[in-house]
Image: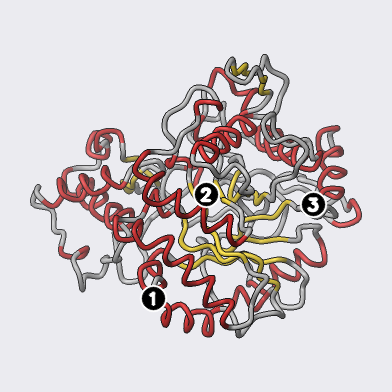
Amino acid sequence: MLNPTSTSLIFLFLHLVSAVYSIGVNYGTLGNNLPSPAAVANFLKTRTAINGVKLFDVNPEYIQAFANTGISVAVTAPNSDIVPLAEANFARQWVVDKIKPFYPATKINFILVGSEVLHWGDQKMFKKLVPAMRSLHSALQAEGINDIKVTTAHSLIIMMAKSLPSAGQFRPGFAKHVLGPMLKFLRETKAPFMVNPYPYFDLDPARLDFALFRPNLGLYDRATRLTYTNQFDALIDTVHFAMKALGFADVDIAIGETGWPTNCDNPVLCSVANAVSYNGGLVKHVESGKGTPMLPNRRFETYIFALFNENQKPGPTAERNWGLFQPDLTPIYDSGIFRNGQQVPVAPSVPVGGGGEQWCVPKAEATIQALQSNIDYVCSQGVDCRPIQPGGACFVPNDPKALATYAMSAYYKAKGPIPINCDFSGSGILTTINPSHGGCRM
């Protein structure tokens, strides 16, 4: 039996997706039990009102699956392509190989150059990110494609620590060398500045209602005399103030990822009820066109994270429990995104976990500096690091998180599987999900 919250969400989602700006969904693929891309595309088209997906790569099978569905597709150039994409010839060939075979049958609306590059990338990627965006935009135009926008999505690591939205500032190094030039490019091409605001990752547990769009006392910003009733608005306006400080208040903001997990290591924070509150409140808020206190009367193009629970994602339990759907396409909770108000059975909530063995992996918020420090420490302690050296089975170029995952798990196994051996100054966490991949065994 549907409760009043679920019933209201049906109306909100159905009304929203008919608007010009829609709620889309992030389509991640880190699972060994997920349906085929063709099955997913057909399901979204025929059963749901979702009309936009965001992919984390340019896998041709996934892009092709959405051909002639009318569903917009945002694709992502991998971080490893950023440096070569800065070269015009490489970018031109990349467009020919990765985009033209599917355009316009697949309705590609964005190409994201990398994913949270300023969070996970290295200095060379930072330097080449904006040149790669410009080069890719020029390559699209040279191939006669003028309706695909080039942008990239940022985690909020780009922000200085802040207490109020009006104090929002970008980190100085990023602001001067990357974000300022990037915003100039986005203004020129009328593309949005895309951010991934997660109240879940910026959470004060004492203000859970503020994060979940529930009634609360609000946050008063003395500088603007504005009151914030939810954390989502506060995060967006914090970014806006940082953009304004650089002279780019006119550039649109889009939401690349946001959501709430149904399960994590703290059941007070993560539950189906909390996910319904956050995603339901988000949909209602975006659909209303109310905007934020500083950016009133507008809708933000928004992609919820995520379509599925993905059982092969490393890290804490929450990482595998963000989905709207189980892999069999049964809804985890009634989010109201089915066509014509269809009411479907909701699957019992089965958190995605693992077996009894444990591995040590980096926390999602671990910095690049912390990851590199962990790698250096492990390799100085007699642990075999040959697998993460060039040519090794676990070597992944320009991916410090993957390298640190091997190093930290190897140290945990070698020194004894006790929690202290996965502390790494607070940057490590135990998981029951085996992070092995391909020939890399952990």
Q: Please indicate whether residue 186 sits to the left or right of residue 273 in the image.
A: left
Q: Residue at x 37, y 52 (%)?
A: 120
Q: Please indicate whether residue 349 sits to the left or right of residue 21 in the image.
A: left
Quick one: SS at disc 1?
Answer: loop
Which amino acid lies under the numbered mark 2 shown in the image of this protein?
Arg
Q: Residue at x 73, y 37 (%)?
A: 291
Quick one: SS at disc 2?
Answer: helix
Task: Give the image location of residue 354, x and y in percent.
Answer: 45, 50
Which amino acid lies under the numbered mark 1 shown in the image of this protein?
Glu
- Sequence-first tag of 2 and 3: 2
Q: Please indicate whether residue 293 sits to the left or right of residue 384 in the image.
A: right
Mark 1 lies on residue: 87
Q: In terms of depth relative to the viewer, which is nearer, 249 or 358?
A: 249
Vertical relation: 372 (above or below) 134 = above
- Sequence-first tag of 1 and 3: 1
Mark 3 lies on residue: 337
Q: In terms of depth relative to the viewer, which is nearer, 195 or 203?
A: 195
Quick one: SS at disc 3?
Answer: loop
Image quadrant assignment for residue 46: bottom right
Q: In terms of depth relative to the viewer, which is nearer, 141 or 314?
A: 141
Q: Label 2 to label 3, Cα distance in Å?
A: 21 Å
